[in-house]
Amino acid sequence: MQSATKFIGLDVSKEKIAIAIAEAGREEPRWYGTIPHTAKALRKLIKQLGNKETLAFCYEAYRWITSMGAQCCVIASTLIPKRAGDRIKTDRRDALQLAQLFRAGELTSIYVPTREDEALRDLIRTRSDAREDLHRARQRLIKFLLRQQIHPPVTMLLTPSFHGRPAISILSDAPSIADEVSPYPCAHPPT
């Protein structure tokens, strides 16, 4: 960021991006305005601000900005210095503060995961969710069977069958609930 002459603070929300610019030096950062939260609007902003090599952005629109050839850092929002008792929070004030602190080098940037990192995280989360769903389904089935005074063996927890039969067919052994279960498609094992 040494070659940057304009430090741009972006406060990103769902619909708009608030922008403040701190020029190299000691002047107060100036409020630029807001733009729609779109790649087209960011591309137009970068063209209006000048040479891409002299711009340094900070905050959340990282992938869009780097794909347009400008420098961008994602800032850890929990590590942004705040004055004691400063509870007024607006997009304009946040963008001005970001630009000023970014120029001064007082912000801590964080690692931005690559698309491959995100894909791996998504895969791990999906697998974990599926395992939790399976565990909950097993627990529901076991509790249901216990309410019907059917005590499944421990091996039922590990396999989809109960003494060689689909677990749901066990319910036909309990005539009192056979009528309640019969409307459900899962109650009838495939033939």
Image (cartoon, rainbow, N blue to C red):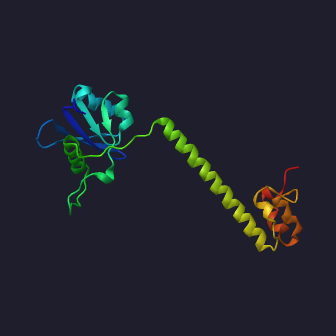
Query: In the rendering, at what x and y percent does residue 40 appear?
Result: 35, 31
Residue drawn at (81%, 65%), measured in percent from left and top? 153
- The answer to whether 16 appears left or right of 179 in the picture is left
Q: Quadrant of residue 64?
A: top left
Residue drawn at (20%, 34%), measured in percent from left and top? 6
Is 10 or 101 nearer to us in this picture? Answer: 101
Q: Quadrant of the image for the N terminus?
A: top left
Q: Is residue 183 visible?
A: no
Is 6 or 2 nearer to us in this picture? Answer: 2
Residue drawn at (69%, 60%), measured in percent from left and top? 137
Residue drawn at (27%, 32%), measured in percent from left and top? 45
- The answer to whether 10 appears left or right of 129 in the picture is left
- The answer to whether 128 appears left or right of 181 in the picture is left
Q: How many marks?
A: 0
Query: In the rendering, at what x and y percent does residue 42 appear?
Result: 31, 33
Q: Is residue 166 visible?
A: yes
Query: In the rendering, at what x and y percent does residue 122 appear?
Result: 54, 44
* Vertical order, 8 against 152 (above or below): above
Query: In the rendering, at what x and y percent does residue 188 appear?
Result: 84, 56
Is 40 or 55 nearer to us in this picture? Answer: 55
